């Protein structure tokens, strides 16, 4: 069963620029899916069409459907989507730097939540990210980039989501921190049965933690399948996995005009 289903989605910015061109994808209930592609391909726009965050950037869905739990949520406000169980971790972390980690987690909790329930949610976050517990009374602005990313994921978790969407969680982080965060994403999916929609440019890391992946290029889904299928594709190997053979820049430019999915 699909928890999230996008059907032929088109997104327009400033009533001029068509950023998403007929995107269709599914996230199964309890599943883990990656949306991969280069910078500017339309990955973040796809997430914002689900969370309802297009309007502040003068974007709008002009065609297609966003179905969550079988319901078209296109007219719902962002807070209403959060109440339904959709949480997005935005690119760039965006924590409240003047608050400490615990205050950040409390601020993200839905209004009216029982104190014991909130305390249990916060302890669950600390279970995944022990560093946050150690630094829970330090202003978030003084945390490292990796700790801020952990906090951003933790804030999403205290909303008790059914679907967790992550936008470039590896951005700007050291390889060891990337491995730790991706392992925790895998654990959250496996242990909490939270569905994951992961947007990443780090294709190698993303394919290690998901069961299905979509490749978006120039606003269109050009390929999807299991991680094994994408790893075996020669174009994915060449453009997203580093390639098997070293090519000089002239050959790369020449070959880019011949991507098989654009022919």
Image: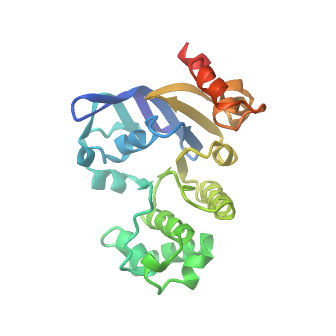
Q: Which residue is drawn at 56% across and 19% down?
A: 257
> In the image, is residue 50 above or below residue 128?
above
Q: Is residue 158 left or right of residue 207?
A: left
Please identify the quadrant where the C terminus is shown. Answer: top right
Q: Is residue 165 left or right of residue 129?
A: left
Q: Is residue 77 left or right of residue 30?
A: left
Report whether residue 178 is seen: yes
Q: Position of residue 168 (x, y in %)?
A: 51, 51
Q: Which residue is drawn at 29% across and 38% down?
A: 74
Q: Which of 148 and 28 is in front in this view?
A: 148
Q: Which of 18 and 163 is in front in this view?
A: 18
Report whether residue 69 is seen: no
Q: Which residue is drawn at 29% across and 56% down?
A: 79
Q: Position of residue 146 (x, y in %)?
A: 56, 67
Which residue of the protein is positioned furthest toward the bottom in this rendering?
137
Q: Is residue 232 left or right of residue 45?
A: right
Q: Which of 156 and 112 is in front in this view?
A: 156
Q: Where is residue 63 in the image (x, y as percent from the top left)?
A: 30, 26
Q: Nearer the viewer, residue 49 or 243?
A: 243
> In the image, is residue 71 above or below residue 223?
below
Q: Where is residue 55 in the image (x, y as percent from the top left)?
A: 24, 45
């Amino acid at each position: 069963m699909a928890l999230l289903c996008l059907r032929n989605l088109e997104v327009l910015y400033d009533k001029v620029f068509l950023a998403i061109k007929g995107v269709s994808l599914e996230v199964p209930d309890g599943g883990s899916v990656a949306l991969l592609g280069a910078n500017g391909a339309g990955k973040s726009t796809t997430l914002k069409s689900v969370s309802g965050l297009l309007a502040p950037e003068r974007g709008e869905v002009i065609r297609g459907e966003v179905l969550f739990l079988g319901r078209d949520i296109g007219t719902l406000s962002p807070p209403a989507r959060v109440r339904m169980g959709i949480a997005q971790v935005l690119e760039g972390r965006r924590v409240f730097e003047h608050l400490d980690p615990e205050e950040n987690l409390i601020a993200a909790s839905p209004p009216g939540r029982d104190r014991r329930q909130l305390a249990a949610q916060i302890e669950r976050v600390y279970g995944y990210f022990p560093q946050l517990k150690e630094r829970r009374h330090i202003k978030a602005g003084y945390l490292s980039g990796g700790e801020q990313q952990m906090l951003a994921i933790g804030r999403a978790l205290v909303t008790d989501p059914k679907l967790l969407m992550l936008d470039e969680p590896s951005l700007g982080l050291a390889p060891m921190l990337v491995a730790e965060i991706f392992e925790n994403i895998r654990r959250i999916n496996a242990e909490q049965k939270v569905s994951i929609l992961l947007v990443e440019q780090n294709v190698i890391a993303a394919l290690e933690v998901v069961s299905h992946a979509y490749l978006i290029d120039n606003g269109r889904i050009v390929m999807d399948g299991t991680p094994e299928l994408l790893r075996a594709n020669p174009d994915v190997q060449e453009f997203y996995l580093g390639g098997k053979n070293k090519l000089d820049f002239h050959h790369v430019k020449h070959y880019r005009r011949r991507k098989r999915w654009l022919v």
